[in-house]
Image: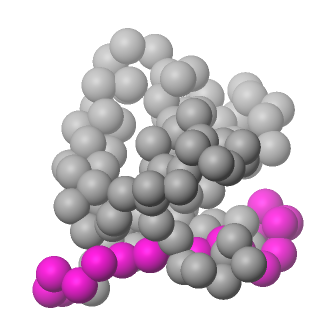
């Protein structure tokens, strides 16, 4: 996994990004209970603060997944899929997602986020 991160010159994939993204994703889903969770936009767009937005963490995982060779892809997929399941269960669909143009190709951006994000 580190090899892919190393070889890539992507903005996202600095060394350790996979680990960090996974930890961030788990942390977001951590609060127990059934209360819905709302992703929040990060206030700063530098590579480090971007992780404040859990959707950025999911972007990173997606990008890594796309680049990984088959076997590593499957291994990481096993870690990410259960988190996706929880994410879908604990976030709400955004009925107005179709109105937005920003990144709606990714399903994790089509969930209701903290209202402050969209003004
Ligand atoms: Zn920053």
**Left or right, 17 with reference to 119:** left
Q: Quarter-wise, where is residue 74 in the image?
A: top left
Check the image and name the residue furthest to the top.
Answer: 70
Picture layout, residue 84 above or below residue 5: below
Q: Is residue 83 visible?
A: no
Q: Is residue 6 visible?
A: yes
Magenta region, main secondary structure: loop
Residue at the spot 82% in from the left edge and 75% down from the top edge: 44
Position of residue 43 measured from the top left corner of the image (x, y, whole percent): 78, 79
Residue at the spot 53% in from the left edge and 23% down from the top edge: 66
Q: Quarter-wise, where is residue 25 in the image?
A: bottom left
Q: How many marks?
A: 0
Picture layout, residue 87 above or below residue 81: below
Range shown magenta: 32-48
- Foreground: 15 or 29? 29
Residue at the spot 68% in from the left edge and 75% down from the top edge: 117
| Image quadrant where one finds the C terminus | bottom right
Does residue 101 belong to the magenta stretch?
Answer: no
Position of residue 79 measured from the top left corner of the image (x, y, whole percent): 27, 46
- Identify the image's colour scheme: rainbow, by chain, secondary structure or one colour: one colour
**Left or right, 119 with reference to 64:** right
Position of residue 106 measured from the top left corner of the image (x, y, whole percent): 53, 39
Does residue 35 belong to the magenta stretch?
Answer: yes
Residue at the spot 45% in from the left edge and 58% down from the top edge: 94
- Foreground: 51 or 33? 33
């Amino acid at each position: 996994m580190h090899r892919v991160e190393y070889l890539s010159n992507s903005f996202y994939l600095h060394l350790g990004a996979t680990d960090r993204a996974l930890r961030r994703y788990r942390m977001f889903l951590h609060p127990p209970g059934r209360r819905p969770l709302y992703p929040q936009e990060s206030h700063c767009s530098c590579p480090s603060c971007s992780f404040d937005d859990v959707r950025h963490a999911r972007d990173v995982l997606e990008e890594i997944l796309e680049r990984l060779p088959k076997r590593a892809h499957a291994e990481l997929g096993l870690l990410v899929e259960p988190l996706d399941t929880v994410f879908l269960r604990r976030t709400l669909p955004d009925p107005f997602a179709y109105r937005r143009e920003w990144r709606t190709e990714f399903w994790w951006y089509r969930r209701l986020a903290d209202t402050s994000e969209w003004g």
